[in-house]
Amino acid sequence: MLLAMDVGNTNITVGLFLESELITMWRMASDRAQTWDEYGLQLVQLLEGEGHTPGDISCAAMASVVPPLNAVLSRAVQRYLNVSLKELRSGLRSLPVIRYDNPEALGTDRLVNALAGWEIYGRPQNRPVIVVDFGTATKLECVSADGEYLGGCIAPGIGIATEALTRRTALLQRVELQRPRSVIGRNVVASMQSGILFGFAGQADGLVRRLAREIAPSGPPPVVVATGGLADLVAPESRTIELVDPHLTLQGIRRMYELNWADPVREA
Amino acid sequence: MLLAVDVGNTFIVLGIFAGERLEAEWTVHTDPRKTLDEYGLLVTSLIERSGFQRDQVTGVTISSSVPPLLPTLEWMCQKYFHLKPLVIGPGVRTGMMIRYDNPREVGADRIVSAVAAFEKYGGPLIVVDFSTAIILDAISARGEYLGGVIAPGIDVSADALFQFAAKLPRIELVKPERALARNTVHAMQSGIIFGFAGMVDELVERMAAELDPQHQGCKVVATGEQAGLLAGECATIQHYDPYLSLNGLRIIYDRHQARGGR
C-alpha cells in the first residue's frame, strides 16, 4: 500500500492507497516542534488503529510546503515504516506541459492538485479544469483540456484571514463558522458569519470567473472542482463550484508517485 | 473650526472643518501606547503646519473603535485645546434610527459613516468601508441603520498569508494585468486584489437582494484607506468617498450643537 502525505502549513493529511483507491485518511497538526520519533509513533498508532501494520506499507510519497518538516518526516517514515519517503518536486514528471515562469517555483501542493484535477475531471470530459483548494491559503490552478498547466492564483485562506481579523481588532470576537439566517446581520457575530461565509464564496467565484474568461474565452467551460478543509462549508454558497473532492490532493500525490517511481501501486 | 477625529484599529484620521468645508485632513497610525502629550504635540503640529492656529479650534468630536485610546485623546483635548470633545458612542443622538439587536454593540465608526452617506446619497444605500475589516452596512430608504456584514480586511489577510505560508514572499499590493499568474508574486497579487473584489461584489449583491428586493435603485458607496485600490475592480461600487467618516462626525456634531449641546 502507498502512504501519501500532504504537508501543509496547518495540517498534515495522510492517506492510505490500495492501488488507486483511498482506503483511509487522517489529519495531524503541522507542528515543527515534533520529532521524527513522535511523528513515527503517531503514524504507527494510526495504522494499527485501523487494523494495518507498518509492514503493509510498500511505498510512501510526500508533497510538502513546509521545508523544515521534510527531513523530520522522512526520518519518521524510514525508521517506523521501513520505507523511503519520496519527496515530490516540481522537476519530476507530472502534467505534460507546465506553463510557469520558473517551474521549480511552483509549489508541489499546487502541482499535484492540478494533476489530479486534470486526470480525474478535465481529461475524461475533455474540458479545461479549475481547482480551488481552500487551505491555509486559497489556491486556484488552471489546466487545459489536454493537460497543459496554465497558471493560477493564491489568496488569503478563510481560517488565517478570520483569525488575523479577530487578533487585530479591539471589538471583534471569534465566531463559529456557520450559515447566518440573513445576509444583513443585526449583531456582530451574525455580521461576521455572513461576511466570512458569503464573502469567501465570493472571493472564490470572483477569481474563478476571471480565470475562466482568460483560459476558456470560447469552447467548453472549465470544470470547477473544490478541495481542502473548508471546501464543504463554502462550496454550497459558491455559484461557480460544481463539485467537492476532499481527496483531490492525495490522489494527485498518488498519481505523481506512479508517474515517477512505479506502475500503479501494487499491494505489498 | 471643528476638529474631527476618527480612531480606527490601524489609522487615526483627523480633519478640520470651517463650516461644512473640510479644510485639511491627516492620517496617523494608531498607537495605544502613545501618551496624551505625544498625541497633543502631533495634532497641534499638524494643525499649525497647515497654516492654522490651535485656538481656531472651537470644537472637537471623536469616534473610536479602540476603547483604550479614548481617555488619552479626551485628556489631550483638555490640555492642548481646552475643550471637552463630543465622543460619539452609546447615548449620543446621531439622528439615525438603529435597528440592531443591541444598538450599543454597533461600532461608532459604522454609524458615523452611515450618517454621512445617507445625507449625501440617500437610501436605500450600502456603505463599504475598506479598513482593518471590510465592513458593509445597509441603510434603508427611510434612513434607518439595518445592520451589515463584517469580513477580514485586505492588509490583515495579506499579512496573515505571508506569515503562515512559509514559502510565500511578502509582496507589494498592486493590481496585475490579468488574473492567471505564472509566478508566485503575480499569483498572490491576483489572488488578493481580484479575490477581494469578488468578495465585495458578492456581499453587495446579496445585501442588495435583501435591502432592495424590488430593484428600485440601491446606492453603493465605498470609503476607507484601501478603497482606492479596490473600488475600480468592484463592479458593484458606484461612488468612492474617502472622507465619509470625517463628514459624518461633522454632521453629528452640528446636530448636537443645534440641540443646544444635549
Image (spheres, rainbow, N blue to C red):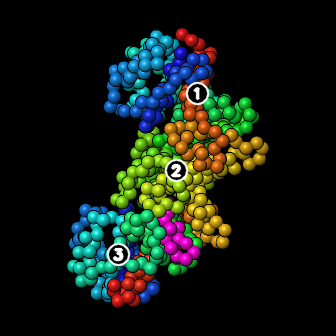
**Does residue B49 show up?**
no
Whether pointer 1 and pointer 3 mark residues with C-beta atoms closer than 8 Å, the reply is no
Taking A238 as reference, is A243 above or below it? above
Chain on which label 2 sits: A
- Which residue appears at 34% of the width and 21% of the height? A37
Amino acid, disc 3? Gly
Horizontal placement of A239 versus B82: left or right?
A: right
Q: Spatial distance from mark 2 to mark 3, Cα to Cα?
A: 32 Å
B143 falls in the magenta region: yes
**Does residue B143 show up?**
yes
Label disc, if present, on residue B91 of the rendered structure: 3
User: Which residue appears farthest toward the right when viewing the image?
Assistant: A219
Of residues B164 and B93, which is closer to you in this image? B93
For the residues beneath circles 2 and 3, the answer to whether they share a chain is no
Residue B157: horizontal and vertical position, in percent?
45, 52
User: Which of disc 1 and disc 2 is earlier in sequence?
Assistant: 2
Whether pointer 2 and pointer 3 mark residues with C-beta atoms closer than 8 Å, the reply is no
Residue behind mark 2: A179
Taking A26 as reference, is B122 above or below it? below
Amino acid, disc 2? Arg
Q: Which residues are magenta?
A: B138-149
Residue A159: horizontal and vertical position, in percent?
45, 45
Whether pointer 2 and pointer 1 mark residues with C-beta atoms closer than 8 Å, the reply is no
- Which residue appears at 66% of the width and 68% of the height? B214
Residue behind mark 1: A251
For the residues beneath circles 2 and 1, the answer to whether they share a chain is yes
